[in-house]
Amino acid sequence: MMRLRPFSPTDISDVMKIVGSSMQEKYPASMFLELHNIWREGFFICEYFGSTVGLIVGTLSGFRTARILVIAVLEPHRCKGIGTALLNEFTNACGMKGLSNIELEVRKSNKGAIKFYEKHGYQVIDIIPHFYNDGEDGFKMLRNL
Ligand SMILES: CC(C)(COP(=O)(O)OP(=O)(O)OC[C@H]1O[C@@H](n2cnc3c(N)ncnc32)[C@H](O)[C@@H]1OP(=O)(O)O)[C@@H](O)C(=O)NCCC(=O)NCCS
């Protein structure tokens, strides 16, 4: 049973576990709490049978544009539709706010995530050389709402 809900600061330790096991980049807990303070409607959690298994968090990045900063699902729970549910919830929140675009960055080597985003209407619009700390290039992807 999947349940989507807004992030609460009491979720921070679960969020850090999911992010720590899913992403190559390191993010401090303070960043997530700060993002939540800035835009509460852009931060969702997914529970699966009562356990927290995924999250999506974004920010407002420009004129009528949102930027997805992190989407992650615990590895054993991937490919069950949880990432799609999180992305749809975030997209709906952007629509309700009257935004026109959603942008994001993804590692060039992250074929799974690129396929996931393309399936949801995102297109690569640019390459950002050495975007990541280890020097890997990023793709900038964009979807119009
Ligand atoms: C990207 C991510 C959030 C997708 O979540 P998910 O719950 O697995 O996504 P869904 O089940 O809703 O969708 C799965 C679809 O996405 C694509 N996909 C996701 N992961 C994939 C992978 N490793 N390889 C190939 N396709 C993949 C496929 O099209 C798949 O559909 P299919 O099963 O019909 O082929 C998840 O894989 C994840 O947490 N990855 C690690 C963190 C990450 O890379 N985040 C993005 C950083 S920019």
Image (cartoon, rainbow, N blue to C red):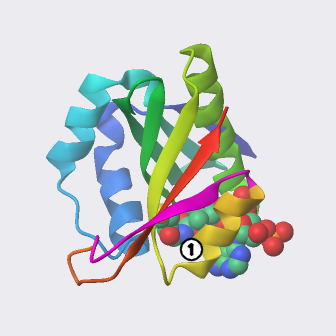
Residue displayed at 31% across by 75% down = 129
At 36% from the left and 30% from the top, the residue drawn is 62
User: Is 100 or 36 nearer to us in this picture?
Assistant: 100
Can residue 123 be found in the magenta stretch?
yes
At horizontal 25% and vertical 25% (from top left) the residue drawn is: 37
Within-10-Å neighbours for mark 1: few <14, some 14–19, many 20+: few
Give left or right: position of 115 versus 99. right
The response on whether ligand 1 sits within 8 Å of label 1 is: yes
Of 77 and 94, the residue lying toward us: 94
Q: Which residue is mark 1?
A: 75
User: In the image, residue 35 lies at what x, y percent?
Assistant: 27, 35
Q: Which residues are magenta?
A: 120-131
Above or below, 70 against 62 in this view is below
Q: Residue at x 56, y 74 (%)?
A: 75
Q: How many marks?
A: 1
Camera-side residue of 86 and 112:
112
